[in-house]
Each structure stands twice: as structure tokens, then as C-alpha cells.
Image: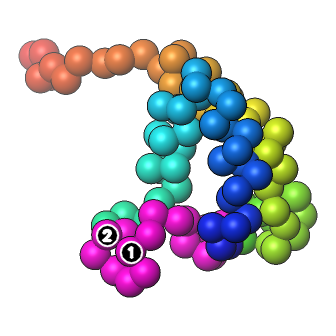
Amino acid sequence: MGPGELGPAVGALLSRPDLWAAAVAVAWRLAPSAWWRRWPFSPLPDAELWAFRMVTAYGAPDARPLPADVVSFVEWSRAGARRRPVRACRPPSG
């Protein structure tokens, strides 16, 4: 996946300021851990992970995500984050 493949999806998200924070959270979750330590210094997902995601979504490892699908995924991710309860860390009683 190259940066040019993200252009249409980024454009679709730029027109939705209400999704910007959720889009950053999704991008952060997809980025390889410690991406800033390895060349190329890019938070783009690992090629194997991206191919797996494209196979599960579109049936082909070289598929490109549709902008509308990216927006829908970010909306879905944001809605799921809102439903998760925040749990306080408490020591076990007993």
C-alpha cells in the first residue's frame, strides 16, 4: 500500500471533521508498534496486515479500499468506542 492509494479515503475523511479524531485512532491502531524506530519511518500498516484486511474485506490482497467503506469503518469504530464501558482499575476485594 502506498500513500497514493490513501488519497481518496483521506479526502473523504477530510470532509467529515466529526470523524477526524476517530480516524486518527483507527490509524494509530493499524500502525505497526514503534514504527518511528524502523525504516521507512511511516505509520502505514504492515504489508501483511494490510493484505489480510483487504482479503477479508474485498476478497483480494491487492484491493484498494473504497472511500465510502473507509468512512463507514471509521464511523463503526467510533460507535463501538462509545459503547465500551470505562472500567476503573480496582484491587480485588477479599
Helix, strand or loop under label 1: loop
**Sequence-first disc among 1 and 2:** 2
For residue 90, side relative to residue 42 (left or right): left
Residue type, numbered disc 2: Trp
**How has the structure been colored for display?**
rainbow
Residue drawn at the location 48% of the way across and 41% of the way down:
24
Q: Give the residue number, with chain letter if any, for mark 2.
A: 36
Quadrant in which the C terminus appears:
top left
Q: Residues within 10 Å of mark 1 (few under 14, many from 20)?
A: few
Residue drawn at the location 44% of the way across and 50% of the way down:
28
Residue 67 image-quadrant placement: top right
Q: Residue 26's mark?
A: none
Q: Which one is nearer the viewer's eye here, 7 or 49?
A: 7
Where residue 62 appears, as percent x and y from the top left, is: 82, 74
Residue drawn at the location 38% of the way across and 74% of the way down:
41
Residue furthest to the bottom in view is: 39
Residue furthest to the right in view is: 59
Q: Give the residue number, with chain letter if any, for mark 1.
A: 41
Which portion, as a residue range, is magenta?
A: 35-50
For residue 88, side relative to residue 44 (left or right): left
